[in-house]
Amino acid sequence: MTDDPLLQVRDLHAHIGSPRGVVRAVDGVSFEVRKGQALGVVGESGSGKSVMARSIMGLMPARSAHSGEVCFQGRDLLALNHKQSQEVWGKQIAMVFQDPGRSLNPVVRVERQLTEGMRRHLGVSRIEARDRALGLLKEVGVPDPERRLRSYPHELSGGMRQRVMIAIALACEPDLLIADEPTTALDVTIQRQVLDLLRKVQLERDMALMLISHDLAVVAGRTDRVAVMYAGKMAEIGATRQVFEAPRHRYTHALLGATPTIDHERHTPLRLIPGSLPAPTDPPAGCRFAARCDYAEAACTDPGPAMKAVGQDHQVACVNPARSGAADSKDSDLVGR
């Protein structure tokens, strides 16, 4: 892993027009990802995680607007036109989407979907592309790859379709893989297989990985750093073990406290975070978690917290952060899962 960031996101804003007004889905997010590093991005559904990923990829709808900088290997991706972006997709940055059933073309065989990117970006022959496709299917654990190449997506199970999606994403040897909720709609056993596969190929290829999930347990043992998003803003970012063992933002602390654990006492209610996410068309001033926080004070809303360092490689946007080491002992059980 090098010290130079592979991806630098600076003050990223992504707003989307809607009948109810402008949705401020991502509102001033900054972070870095280095080569060979795995970054987990967590937060409740609606926090802006997927929109942020699509902004990085340049896959936002026409009614959207964005600002800030997304520098990949020193090149601002937001300044690229569609043709220039096509040269980046697949070859330098690839993405695994939430629903492989909707992402794969239902009327095109797996072989063509696997090989067309290699032939375009790598300039290999049809035979060489097919051989590489077979090797990729074997690498991601697809049984009987010869047969699967001839299959249509609907002939595969959900787990097999997701493995094919991962193989497609890896086909052109990208430097960064973005996995956006890659285990959606999969059963628990298949979820673990897919997540372990992503971590395995990331380490073997020394590839950067952004793993996006609303499930804290998903990122706990499979990432080097974790970023916590809330209502379009970054709440906390740092080394995974440090954030899980000693969360400093009150939202991170509440998320960990609300996560069920195997030793949770039976017939007792789970801990919940009261309230709900603020409306993205009219977010409150200052800290957007203040209305749900038991420790909120006047400074939380006027002017609100800025991201500040609270340790080595650990930053938090909180006026009244939790004390270091103040996490419930159950919170750290997720680490190492």
Image (spheres, grey):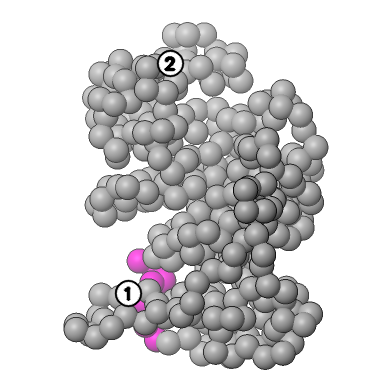
Q: Residue at 58% of width from left, 30% of height from top? A: 90
Kind of residue at disc 2: Arg
Please tell me which of labels 2 and 1 falls first in the chain. Answer: 2
Q: What residue is pinned by disc 2?
A: 112
On residue 260, the disc is: 1
> From the viewer's perspective, is residue 106 above or below residue 247?
above
Q: Which residues are magenta?
A: 329-337
Q: Is residue 85 left or right of residue 252?
A: right
For residue 153, what is the image quadrant? top left
Q: Residues within 10 Å of mark 1 (few under 14, many from 20)?
A: some
> From the viewer's perspective, is residue 263 above or below residue 149?
below
Kind of residue at disc 1: Pro
Residue 237 location, x and y as percent?
62, 68
* Magenta stretch holds residue 330: yes
Q: Residue furthest top?
A: 126
Secondary structure at numbered mark 1: loop
Residue 189 location, x and y as percent?
24, 52
- Note whether residue 227 is visible: no
> From the viewer's perspective, is residue 11 above or below residue 150?
below
Q: 280 or 139: which is nearer to us? A: 280
